[in-house]
Amino acid sequence: MNKNLLDVLRIGIFYDGYYFYKVSNYYKYEHEKKSRISISGLHEYIRNEIASLTQVDFRRCQIIDAHYFKGRSLAKDLGDKVQSERVFEDILMRENIVSHYLPLRYSENTGVQEKGIDVWLALEAYELAIYKHFDILVLVAGDGDYVPLVRKLHTLGTQVMLVCWDFSYHNESGDIVETRTSRQLQDEVYFPVPMHQRIDQAESETVKDLFVPEKIWTNFQHVQNPLPNTSNEPNSFDNATNEFISFIFSINPNGFGFIKDDERNNIFFHYSTVTNRDFPELKAGMNVKYMVEEDEERSKRDEAPRFRAIKVTVLDELPQ
């Protein structure tokens, strides 16, 4: 590491995009913060952390390169979500982060798969560490597959900081979803930073700045008088697509809501099932088209058929 006090401490940041996407969704929909991670706030936090650990002035801790790697759906599969993708890309550009995308692969047996991203990230990180002489490379990831990369970086004299999260929550089916950082990866790096602990244990300004400022939602927004639905048949069935048409009855800021469906006692839906809008854009009264399946766990518990939506699409206009 360069010890000349007049020199800049050179920092490179590399994002495993899908990992960061899961983390951001967790804080937006599952955690009490109810807000997404701020890229600019995270970069400032990283600089402060490195300044503290190395005893180098904050102004000399400079991010000279940042890269984001993620699998990407085809435009035809995204529908209206293309705009949301572009908004995030604009954020990355404003923070001088270079985006790297590979097309997602589809398999009849396993569905959508992200292949080759970790290898590409490792190759780019190692090559750029050689040519740009990073003093510290920051890895925003949690997969043990990055252990060989860390070991190779150490041979170059580049120290590695790991920015990582551990968390768990119950999904719409009631199952526990866990994200855990590889213990081996944490042991290999010089600076492991468990962000979930930092966020839950501290109330400093740097922690507050980690989140995108947003209007705080009230508790469960049960709508007594939802916006008028213009459909003459609010629970009509679309024979062409095997989907029902109705409107959103209520929205909960924790990432779920209910669709008006008198026949099936209203339909629960999770933010992950919405195909063409970001969940915060949804409002009670919006017309939607949706597919349903039986929620077997709730049906057993309530001793009556219970259903949930497995695909929800907001309709800008109702079909004729």
Image: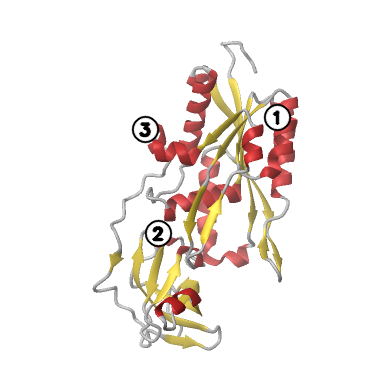
Mark in the foreground, 3 or 2: 3
Visual colour scheme: secondary structure
Q: Is residue 258 above or below residue 318?
A: above
Sequence-wise, the earlier of marks 2 and 1 is: 1
Q: Residue at x 53, y 19 (%)?
A: 60
> Disc count in the image?
3
Mark in the foreground, 1 or 3: 3
Question: Which disc number belongs to residue 129?
Answer: 1
Q: Residues within 10 Å of mark 1 (few under 14, many from 20)?
A: many
As measured in the structure, the alpha-carbon distance from the residue carrying label 2 to the one carrying label 1 is 39 Å
Disc 3 target residue: 205
Q: Would residue 124 be seen by someone viewing this image from the given angle? A: no
Residue 129: percent from left, percent from top: 70, 29
Quadrant location, the N terminus: top right
Give the quarter of the image for residue 132: top right
Relative placement, left or right, of 50 versus 34 is right
As measured in the structure, the alpha-carbon distance from the residue carrying label 1 to the one carrying label 3 is 31 Å
Quadrant location, the C terminus: bottom left
Q: Secondary structure at mark 3?
A: helix
Q: Residue at x 44, y 70 (%)?
A: 269
Q: Secondary structure at mark 2?
A: helix
Disc 2 target residue: 280
Give the quarter of the image for residue 218: bottom left
Residue 188: percent from left, percent from top: 66, 33
Which sits in the foreground, 122 or 297? 297
Q: Would residue 27 be seen by someone viewing this image from the given angle? A: yes
Would you say the residues marked 2 and 1 are in contact, meaning their CB atoms lie under 8 Å apart? no
Residue 154: percent from left, percent from top: 71, 27
Q: Residue at x 68, y 56 (%)?
A: 114
The amino acid marked with disc number 2 is: Pro
Q: Secondary structure at mark 1?
A: helix
The amino acid marked with disc number 3 is: Glu
